[in-house]
Image (tube, rainbow, N blue to C red):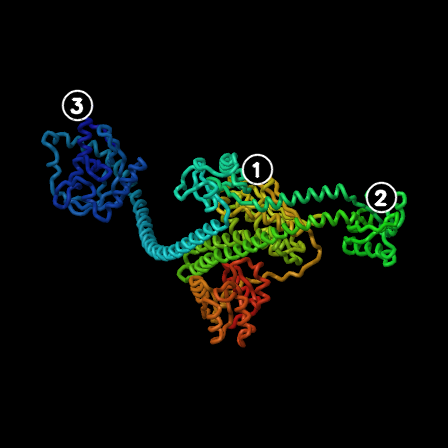
């Protein structure tokens, strides 16, 4: 505030008091309030504007502010206290004893040191004249009347300054009014957005109820999986292998029935320390091996004997949980007493054979060139035939043959047979130097090395062979019996794996179909969250199905039952297709994928499906082990008759001690990133190496250590032959099922209903059957455009069903698609021979079904 100097004042104290009093009387009204609007002080001339309509002084400033302006005043007070700066609020309507007036407010923060309180000082500028109901003279006390004139003169000078300040404040108030209008518009927009959010909340509530329904269905599937787990436990118990599961404190967690007799385990011993039980094994390292299994992940396998004379193969493995924790160890004791006895007998027989050969037999080793001329003659030949090396070198081999064999051309015939077949068996009578006839047994083998093409003839005396053969036949007979039992067990294992695959893939197929239904419902297509959840479930289902297929492939490789379909294959096209399919996963993980692949075809002679399996495993592994902001580089080159595929990443790397075992079955790298811990059994890289070896190639891994990335190099033999490639097909339009008459055969009621519902969403007319007999009855009564049937049916299998369907008059050209729980490669050949048009593996998608239908023939509309 500005004041003029007062004339003729008695002293400074009186002057200051008078000036303050004059300011209260004639200056602008001043009100001091708290944050909530409570008035703690008001100037004399502020009394009138702080009286309400009943002429009572209010204790809170907001009581005289008109209702629609109270929010503005509160916001202005809040801004003033928050920013600690002056704030202006123009044209605030007050409802006072003099009626409604308009007041401009200037707010300043004020700190009350006496009460340690933050206050706001408000200077009021009435923009509307007050009705003067009380003379001004009555405001002053009698003793102050003498100073009124002098005070008026003092204030006259300040009025000019105040007027200019008020004009400035008025312009500021205009700007604030404009801002207020903008804020009001924003408030309206926010209110509209709030209403929209409320509507969205109701929609989300509805979607949440639908998700709860899906969750209950998934819960039933989890319970079904638990039942399958119980079946597996019972199966393990029936196998007959003594197995004991212990925790990290060596307390018994679980055991199979054969272990009861070995460890004297009773039904109430679960949870007891294994050390407290007496066992019948000569195995002093038992507990140290168990501790090494879960402390250092050391696996052990050794033969141990029991006190009753039996021999066991003791295997100790770490117990790994679903979340990749080592929670103890597993001890398996396999009774190999019979095999051990057979092995000992075989070794004894072999020793006897060696002794007999050393004491009674000498081998004759003779080398001849292509024309039959002898170039090498050993001491054994001298002993058997009586001819010295000097007598035979440079001469034909005829002298050791009988005259009849020489006349029949036997020496030349043997060389011809060995040249074409690589080997010719030789078991006949021979002649010696002294004219004796001896019976020799051996073979003539082709030698084709650099610098010398020829043959090597190795024979020995028949007497020793007869003795050795009789003894060896006994051993072979025992081994033949053992091999028969092994083949029987292998066949049982294959059947078990096939049944297990079917039982596991049935619930996966139902989950996959239900998820497709959820994602394709009209009300869910506009919800990104539902689509995201459905996509995540589908990816998880396909990942589980891939793990099952990998296990089956690995089993077939180990037993030599995996067959490859060799054909000209473009590796470059496969790499580009897989990279395109996985680009979304790379973008989501924030990992950059770099391709260095030739634009021209890179051809090998191989199985395209298995080559895709190699590339997919390597690229998905690189993504899994590479953190965000990392890189994965895929290179493809032709070099020196080989196709070289390199997949390098900047991920967690491989420790030097793990490089030697990275391609082993179930081997996984420790200390994985979060994204890599969730999936896989450690069989992908093992499959990669074995598939590469089946193609005649190699697989190698390189890394500079943990945290420094890894590089995998696959080399496959190149094939320069060209191959015709068709342009990529466009995605199949699912409208192909519209108005199609479909016969659906599935023994699982839930899967049957789910698949029927999914096909119905696209306009198909579905007739369902739970078994082959019912399907044949339905087929005889109607016309159909497509048949989809499971291979495993309760009455007769799908192969016999399709044979009977093809005999019906209306079914010779109808597309029939097989659905199997086993990998397609296992059933595809059988399905085509039986009369199916295509074979799909569970879980299958509508896109795959539409592609199969399109490639075999168009479904009638």
Say whether marks 3 and 1 touch (CB < 8 Å). no
413 or 741, which is in the foreground? Answer: 413
Q: Mark 1 vs mark 2: give the one in front.
A: 2
User: In the image, residue 614 lies at what x, y percent?
Assistant: 60, 51
- State yes or no: discs 1 and 2 in contact (Cβ < 8 Å): no
Q: Earlier in the sequence, mark 2 or mark 3?
A: 3
Residue 176 vs residue 755: left or right? left
Q: Is residue 823 visible?
A: yes
SS for tag 1? loop
Which residue does the numbered mark 3 point to in the structure image?
10
Residue placed furthest toward the top: 11
Residue drawn 37% across the image and 57% down it:
213
Residue at disc 3, secondary structure: loop
Marks 3 and 1, how far apart at CA = 97 Å
Q: Which residue is mark 1?
A: 655
**Element type where label 2 sits in the image:** helix
Where residue 382 is drawn, which disc sits there? Answer: 2
Q: CA distance from mark 1 to mark 2?
A: 59 Å
Tell me which residue sits at (43%, 51%) in the image. 230
Q: Is residue 685 left or right of residue 746?
A: right
Q: Nearer the viewer, residue 259 or 95?
A: 259
x and y, in percent, of residue 179 in the image: 32, 46
Q: Can you give x and y, in whole percent of width and height, for residue 289 in the image?
A: 52, 36
Near mark 2 (Cα within 10 A), the count class, few <14, some 14-19 or many ≥20, is: some
Picture coordinates of residue 113, whole percent (x, y):
24, 28
| 49 w.r.t. 777: above or below | above
């Amino acid at each position: 505030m500005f004041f003029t100097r007062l004339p003729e004042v008695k002293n400074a104290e009186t002057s200051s008091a008078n000036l303050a009093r004059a300011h209260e009387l004639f200056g602008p009204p001043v009100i001091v309030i708290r944050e909530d609007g409570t008035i703690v002080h008001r100037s004399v001339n502020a009394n009138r504007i702080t009286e309400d309509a009943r002429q009572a002084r209010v204790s809170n400033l907001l009581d005289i502010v008109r209702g629609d302006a109270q929010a503005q005043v509160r916001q202005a007070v809040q801004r003033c206290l928050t920013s600690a700066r002056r704030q202006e609020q123009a044209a605030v309507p007050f409802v006072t004893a003099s009626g409604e007036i308009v007041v401009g407010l200037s707010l300043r923060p004020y700190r009350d040191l006496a009460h340690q309180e933050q206050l706001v000082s408000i200077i009021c500028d009435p923009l509307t004249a007050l009705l003067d109901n009380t003379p001004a003279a009555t405001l002053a006390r009698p003793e102050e009347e003498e100073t009124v004139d002098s005070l008026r003169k003092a204030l006259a000078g300040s009025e000019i300054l105040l007027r200019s300040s008020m004009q400035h404040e008025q312009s500021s108030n205009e700007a604030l009014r404009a801002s207020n209008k903008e804020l009001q518009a924003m408030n309206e927009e926010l209110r509209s957005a709030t209403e929209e959010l409320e509507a969205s909340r109701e929609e989300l509530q509805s979607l949440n109820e639908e998700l709860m329904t899906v969750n209950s269905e998934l819960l039933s599937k989890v319970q079904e999986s638990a039942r399958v787990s119980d079946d597996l436990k019972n199966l393990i118990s029936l196998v007959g292998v003594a197995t004991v599961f212990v925790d990290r404190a060596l307390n018994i967690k679980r055991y199979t029935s054969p272990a009861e007799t070995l460890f004297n385990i009773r039904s109430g011993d679960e949870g007891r320390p294994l050390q407290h039980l007496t066992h019948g094994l000569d195995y002093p390292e038992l507990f140290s091996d168990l501790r090494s299994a879960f402390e250092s992940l050391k696996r052990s396998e050794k033969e141990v004997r029991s006190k009753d004379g039996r021999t066991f193969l003791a295997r100790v493995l770490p117990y790994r949980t679903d979340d990749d924790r080592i929670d103890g160890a597993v001890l398996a004791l396999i009774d190999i007493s019979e095999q051990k006895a057979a092995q000992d007998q075989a070794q004894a027989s072999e020793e006897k054979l060696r002794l007999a050969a050393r004491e009674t037999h000498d081998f004759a080793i003779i080398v001849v060139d292509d024309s039959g001329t002898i170039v090498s003659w050993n001491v054994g030949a001298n002993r058997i035939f009586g001819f010295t090396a000097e007598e035979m070198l440079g001469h034909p081999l005829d002298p050791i043959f009988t005259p009849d064999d020489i006349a029949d051309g036997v020496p030349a015939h043997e060389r011809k047979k060995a040249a074409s077949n690589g080997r010719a068996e030789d078991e006949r009578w021979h002649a010696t130097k002294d004219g004796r006839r001896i019976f020799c047994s051996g073979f003539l083998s082709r030698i084709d090395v650099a610098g010398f093409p020829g043959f090597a003839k190795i024979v020995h005396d028949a007497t020793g062979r007869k003795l050795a053969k009789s003894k060896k036949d006994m051993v072979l007979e025992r081994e033949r019996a053992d091999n028969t039992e092994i083949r029987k067990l292998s066949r049982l294992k294959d059947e078990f794996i096939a049944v297990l695959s079917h039982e596991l893939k049935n619930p996966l197929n139902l989950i996959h179909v239900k998820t497709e239904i959820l994602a394709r419902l009209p009300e869910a297509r506009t919800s990104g969250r539902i689509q995201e959840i459905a996509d995540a479930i589908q990816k998880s289902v396909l990942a589980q199905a891939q793990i099952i297929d990998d296990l089956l492939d690995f089993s077939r490789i180990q037993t030599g039952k995996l067959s490859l379909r060799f054909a000209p294959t473009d590796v470059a096209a496969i790499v580009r297709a897989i990279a395109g399919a996985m680009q979304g996963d790379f973008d989501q993980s924030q990992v950059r994928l770099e391709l260095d692949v030739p634009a021209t075809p890179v051809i090998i002679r191989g199985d395209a499906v298995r080559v895709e399996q190699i590339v997919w495993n390597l690229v998905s592994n690189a993504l899994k082990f590479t953190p965000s902001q990392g890189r994965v580089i895929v290179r493809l080159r032709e070099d020196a008759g080989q196709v070289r595929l390199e997949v390098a990443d900047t991920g967690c790397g491989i420790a030097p001690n793990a490089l030697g075992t990275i391609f082993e079955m179930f081997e996984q790298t420790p200390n994985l990133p979060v994204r890599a811990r969730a999936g896989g059994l450690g069989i992908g890289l093992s499959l990669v190496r074995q598939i590469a070896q089946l193609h005649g190639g190699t697989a190698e891994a390189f890394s500079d250590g943990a945290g420094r990335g890894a590089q995998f190099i696959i080399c496959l033999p190149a094939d320069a032959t060209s191959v015709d490639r068709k342009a990529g097909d466009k995605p199949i339009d699912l409208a192909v099922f519209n108005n199609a008459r479909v016969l659906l055969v599935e023994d699982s009621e839930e899967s049957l209903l789910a698949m029927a519902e999914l096909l119905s969403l696209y306009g198909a007319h579905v007739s369902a059957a739970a078994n082959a007999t019912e399907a044949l009855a339905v087929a005889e009564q109607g016309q159909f455009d497509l048949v989809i049937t499971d291979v495993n049916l309760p009455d007769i299998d799908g192969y016999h069903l399709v044979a009977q369907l093809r005999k019906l008059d209306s079914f010779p050209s109808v597309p029939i698609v097989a659905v199997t729980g086993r990998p397609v490669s296992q059933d595809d050949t059988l399905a085509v021979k039986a009369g199916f048009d295509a074979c799909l593996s569970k879980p299958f998608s509508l896109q795959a079904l539409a592609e199969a239908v399109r490639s075999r023939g168009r479904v009638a509309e």
